[in-house]
Amino acid sequence: MPGHAGPGKAGMTGAQLFARTLRHWDCGPIFHVPGEGILEALDALADVTLADIGAPLISCRHEAGMAYMAQAAGHALNKPGICLAGRAPGALNSALALHTAFTDAAPMILIIGQPSMRQSGREPFLDNDFSLAFAPVAKWIGTCSDAARLPEMLSRAWATAMTGQRGPVVVAVNEDVWAQSVDAPVLSPPAIARPRVPAADADAIAAMLAGASNPVLVVGGTGWSQAGVAALQTFALTSGLPVVTSYRRRDLMPADHPCFAGELGIGADPAVLDAVARADLVIVAGMRLGEINTFGAGVFEGFRLLAAPQPAQTLVHVHPDASELNRVYRATLPVCAEAEMLFEPLGQSLSAHSLPDWSHWRSALRAAREAFAVGRPGKGPIDMREICRVLRAALPADAMLTVGAGAYAHWPQRYFPHSVYGTQLGPKSGAMGYGLSAAIGVQASCPGRRVVAMAGDGCFLMHGEELATAVLHKLPVIVIVVNNSSYGAIAASQSRHFGRTVGTDLSPVDLSAYARAFGADGFRVETTEAFAPALASALSADGPALIELITGPEALRP
């Protein structure tokens, strides 16, 4: 149980205490790039992290890729992903991934090596003040200079990453701490507070629903469990309430659920954005009301979906972090609680009310969603809509699809349906280079699952070197690269604003040969018909495989 001491050993070193704590906490894979300041920790971890217990040490090629892997592992395992980086150069390489984890509210712990205490304040080699460097992109940054305090620091890091709005934390450890002798217990992970929805608030929301003509439930964020997602889906059915998901959280609702009305954010169906804007009651559960989730119909600009700061609609905002409530939008009823804790008490409160008939409203939203999902064929030799259809048919329902950032991501967003929670992963930060590393993080965490990454050529080559990590650790991820030799999304934006492009044309790269150079299988596809056999070969490969789709500007986005 939380707080109970696990196996310990008198006279351990700080490194051994650290390693045994992570092992006892069943933290999953541990990602790292070896470097100064963490060598003793890695040596101790090698004694306790074994692949057969699901906690292998994964050696990566770049610290940003490493931290993306840990962030994705945190999503997949519903607990903090763990990664270790060496002193300043290595640690600072992870900054972009920390920003992604912070933006995505993903639980992650980054352990950084620091020079010894005796060098503190002397401008030591490879030193940096991480309390300043990472302050905007981490929930908490701690420094450990005493091995006896490692249990305290690790417990605080774990709890901070998992409490309220989840996110990344950083613990810098002075390297002399690893060798210090310490007599301390190996503690269990700390208990995490999960605030519930008060009965009075559930009653108030039920009364609002009873008086609403066109209500919408908008769900998103992290911290969902399988049971919580099931409660959401059941509540939607029993109440008949239309449900919209936040950007890149479509897997909270099965694509064929009769109440699922679509997704907010970039590339959203204008019809669903218009419907949310026309709703008289908007219940937001788990989602932050920042720019990405408040784009209006027909505008690439946030805070246009609802009027800020005072929406015309009645607004209920349920979020586990009180600092998110009333941050931009004044809620009629702000509720500090975990989103998944809403549906049981609200269902009970609704039993005292007769709800209006929302079937016409819900059916109209559902019909618009179905029409949007059908769409139209893609143009050019490779029909990306058909690519997504073939891919979906070939994969099991629980397969994970990861993407990075770029115009190509609009294709799976629109045409790759999800029916199981925990099968969609993509950054809300706009970070390129994410998809492959995220796929590796999920594959290492869930070795029995099929994991596929989709990327553009510009996105993939931001961190394509991590293909070597997949080969080294025999992780059978599949990467599908839409190769148009361009930064396509930026080129489209330049053309729209200035009538020309600057700096967005890229030299052609043979990415299938690139994959083979790392020891992965590589396939080049130039027609729609050639994709299915290439995919079959990739699915039967012993290790990682890359499928390169040669496209042009006509296949930029749906």
Image (cartoon, rainbow, N blue to C red):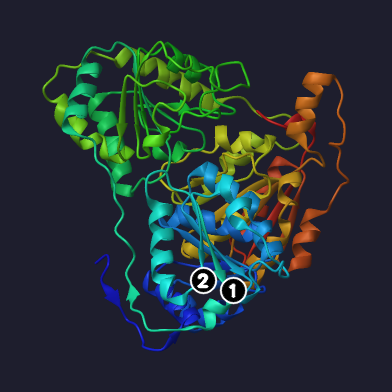
Quadrant showing the N terminus: bottom left
Q: Position of residue 111 (x, y in %)?
A: 54, 65
Residue annotated with mark 2? 145
> Please, what secondary structure does the residue beneath circle 2 have?
loop
Looking at numbered disc 1 in the image, what kind of residue is underneath it? Met
Quadrant showing the C terminus: top right
Location of residue 375 with respect to 180 vertically, above or below = above
Q: Position of residue 546 (x, y in %)?
A: 69, 56
358 and 211: which is toward the camera: 211
Res 62 quadrant in image: bottom right
Q: Position of residue 305 (x, y in %)?
A: 50, 18
Q: Residue at x 53, y 46 (%)?
A: 102
The answer to whether residue 242 is left or right of residue 483 is: left
Looking at numbered disc 2 in the image, what kind of residue is underneath it? Ser
Location of residue 401 with respect to 263 vertically, above or below = below
Q: Residue at x 71, y 62 (%)?
A: 89
The answer to whether residue 409 is left or right of residue 371 is: right
Asked if the residues shown at circle 2 and circle 1 are in contact, with their CB atoms under 8 angstroms apart, the answer is: yes
- Furthest toward the bottom, the residue is 11
Res 275 quadrant in image: top left
212 and 270: which is toward the camera: 212
Res 259 quadrant in image: top left
Residue annotated with mark 1? 117
Location of residue 76 with respect to 32 vertically, above or below = above
Q: Residues within 10 Å of mark 1 (few under 14, many from 20)?
A: some
Q: Confirm whether residue 280 shows in the render.
A: yes
Q: CA distance from mark 2 to mark 1?
A: 7 Å
Q: Position of residue 485 (x, y in %)?
A: 82, 42
Q: Residue at x 42, y 33 (%)?
A: 324
